[in-house]
Image (tube, rainbow, N blue to C red):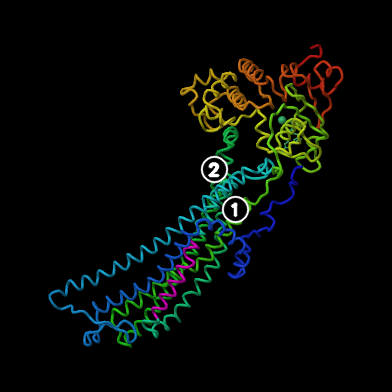
Amino acid sequence: MAADPKAPPAEAKKPIKRLSRKQAAQMSLREFLAESGPLVRRLLSYVHPYRFRFGLGIFFGVIFGLFNSIVILGLKYVFEIVLPSDEALETGRVPIAGNFDLPRPELSGEHGVWTVLALCGIVPVLILVRGILGYLSRYFILWVGQRVLYDLRSKCFEALMGQSLRFYSKSKGGELMQTVFNRTRMVASAGSDVAASMVKHPVSIVTFVGMLFFLDWKFALVAFVVFPLCILPVIHISQKVRKAGGKEEEEAGMVLVTMQEAFAGIRVVKSLAREEYECARFDQGCKQIEKLVMRWRKAMEIVAPMVETVASLGIALGLAYAWHVNMSAGTFLILYASLIAVYPHAKALSQLQIMLQKCLIAASKVFEVLDHPPDIPDAPDAQPLQNVRGAISFDKVTFSYQPGIPAVKEVSLNMEPGRRYALVGQSGSGKSTLFSLLLRFYDPDEGAILIDGKDIRSITQHSLRDHIGIVNQDVFLFHDTILNNIRYGNLEATDEQIIEAARHAHADEFINAQSKGYETIIGDKGSNLSGGQQQRLSIARAFVRNAPILLLDEATSALDSESERHIQEAIDTLSEGKTVIAIAHRLSTILTADAIIVMDAGQVVAVGNHSELLGTCDTYRHLYQLQFGGSLQA
Ligand code: ADP
Ligand code: MG
């Protein structure tokens, strides 16, 4: 029995709430975190395989933060020796903090210069070590980020490849590309920023603040009255930024859609001379992005100057205090350096929430793609199709694309292995739909389709389609060599088999006439081949596939008679020993078919051979005159 396609897969049972940007902007941090808990947990599950390196990244981040205290103490020590206060000169001790001091080395003698140089050399060493620690932290986190990106991208693409045609007819290609490519990147890059910042910055801030209190608690106290004032505008502005941020990414999606459609539909664009129209659409999208980015950047960039201004007030106050307590220049420098060093960390921390939101909003879209259950899943106990004879039956099959408007109604047909069937009917009568149903692109609403007596819903889709070859009117050729384009029909085919297939398809001759023969690259959609040549490549593909069931959708457009003859011969060879269903547009096809199936408005109105149908079926007679240009005397 087939799986109920409406049953959600296990993963989708606990739906992860999708975050809208608007909601996110209105939430407080705590609400936001509570709301996004499941998303975060799910993201972390992607990090889990790389937890060792992730842990290393966090570890180095913490060490980096703590090492800042060593830097400050080291600098203080060097400064106090090189730029001593009067008191230090008198006592011969170097004050570090409070009552703690160290002996002061002699600088005046013969070796004084070298001592000073060695002491000053401590400065770059400290900064270098700090830099290495920061680098290691970033490196490991980035490494994990790139892995997660790779995993997300390939999973997304895989999920999309598993979707049905119905899904694709409802989706925009550009939007899907945006999710697979850009949103995943957003998740990984914003996610690694968050991970890298989450520990490093708080630890650094605590370290700097702690050091300030350790060095001069009175100064620190004053400083941290001024400092919170700096934070206020940051909070205010970051709230504004949240609203603008990320819309940019939505617009980028639209631009990608425009681009993708323009490239895919370039023939239409060109033939209707709509280049300017497409350019205008594209420009409009880009302009919108530019505006959004400017708004977001403006808001981001204004934070720094505001904070600096407020901080300079602190410097003024601090100077007065330094004069009052008779502070050495070295101490003053160190205190200020530590204070200013807090700022970039605080700034980064204030952006953490925005980063997290960017990451989670993108993640919720990515997971939406990952969680979208395929409309047409394989049954859990689906079996591969084996030893196929090629008997096909449609048993009272009804199917509608849109509810209430059936495209095929109660179609019952029995087709015997190894015979040829011609499917005729007006455009829109449901012929292609029967093909789609047989290929299980869609499942029937009622009834069943059987191959060798087995319901195709009990067969794995892969093996079902492996047993069906198709020659279509519209041939899709990849930007690759002719050889590989034919091989697409059967990836295991050897070069010899491919050349053999091309020979059978009457394609060998024109392929050899190409500049590089089988190695010639054909452009997207085979734009440097004629329609008849493309068709023959598609027949060659069906040859290498060598499936027991063959579906032909004959070209309606007139081919030149030379091509037509070649194609007919090729198809005749291809059809040997196979069950063939041909949507017929050529007289020869209906005349040589074992049976003709006449369709009208989604129903099979008659089955029979040409002369029977001419006598009994009005629809057929009518079609025969109109479509096949036949006279009733034929
Ligand atoms: P034929 O191949 O005989 O010309 P089709 O099987 O393509 O007919 O179409 C049968 C009916 O189903 C038509 O009314 C057509 O408009 C409709 N139809 C075909 N494909 C789709 C689709 N992807 N979505 C919605 N309706 C469709
Ligand atoms: Mg059709």
Q: Which residues are magenta?
A: 193-212
Dot 1: element: helix
For the point 58% across and 53% down, the residue is: 250
Where does the C terminus fall, quadrant-wise?
top right
Earlier along the polypeptide chain: callout 1 or callout 2? 2
Ligand 1 resides in the quarter of the picture at: top right
371 over 75 or under it: above or below? above
For the point 66% across and 50% down, the residue is: 372
Q: For this view, does 156 lie left or right of residue 602?
A: left
Q: For this view, does 467 lie left or right of residue 344?
A: right
Q: For this view, does 405 lie left or right of residue 22?
A: right
Kindly indicate the quadrant of the structure image that contains residue 467: top right
Q: Position of residue 217 (x, y in %)?
A: 39, 84
Q: Is mark 2 within 8 Å of ligand 1?
A: no
171 over 600 or under it: above or below? below
Considering the whole magenta stretch, tell me its main secondary structure.
helix
Residue under label 1, please give it. 366
Q: Position of residue 403 (x, y in %)?
A: 79, 43
- Residue nearest the observer in this picture, 206 or 290: 206
Question: Quick one: which residue is furthest to the right in this view?
Answer: 616
Inspect the image, locate mark 2, and give the three-letter code of the amino acid beneath it: Cys
